[in-house]
Image (cartoon, grey):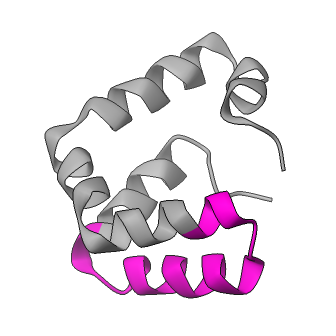
Amino acid sequence: MDDLASVLSRLSPEKRAALFSLASDPEIRRLGEGAGGETLARAARSGDTAALRAAAEGLLSTREGRALAERLSALGYGRG
């Protein structure tokens, strides 16, 4: 799994700025501080894909999680 610095270095300056702006959004920060965000982060760090999928599905089952997914999609993330 790539580390965060490696992933960020491959983004265009515009996408990197948009992602940092999104990460600074108070609503997104509250979501990340909640149980769903921490569970997702822990699963990602572990490298356990089944746990990551379950955590992501749990997060995306919330209104806030769906809103975050929509915002990331608008930035071009989540497309194959």
Vertical arrangement, residue 52 with respect to residue 12, above or below:
below
The answer to whether any part of residue 66 appears in the image is no
Give the image quarter of residue 18.
Answer: top left
- Horizontal placement of 60 versus 26: left or right? right
Q: Nearer the viewer, residue 57 or 75?
A: 57
Q: Residue at x 48, y 50 (%)?
A: 72
Q: Residue at x 25, y 56 (%)?
A: 33
Q: Residue at x 75, y 36 (%)?
A: 3
Percent from the top left, x then y, of residue 12? Answer: 69, 17
Residue farthest to the top, as pictured: 13
Q: Quick check: is 44 in the magenta stretch?
A: yes
- Horizontal placement of 17 versus 4: left or right? left
Per the rendered image, the range of residues in magenta is: 43-64
- Horizontal placement of 41 versus 61: left or right? right
Q: Nearer the viewer, residue 48 or 55?
A: 48
Q: Quick check: is 29 in the magenta stretch?
A: no
Quarter the C terminus occupies? bottom right
Count of picture labels: 0
Percent from the top left, x then y, of residue 19? Answer: 47, 31
Give the image quarter of residue 44.
Answer: bottom right
The answer to whether any part of residue 5 appears in the image is yes
Percent from the top left, x then y, of residue 38? Answer: 38, 64
Q: Residue at x 37, y 64 (%)?
A: 37
Which secondary structure dominates the residues rendered in magenta? helix
Percent from the top left, x then y, of residue 51? Answer: 63, 83
Vertical arrangement, residue 24 with respect to residue 58, above or below:
above
Vertical arrangement, residue 41 with respect to residue 61, above or below:
above
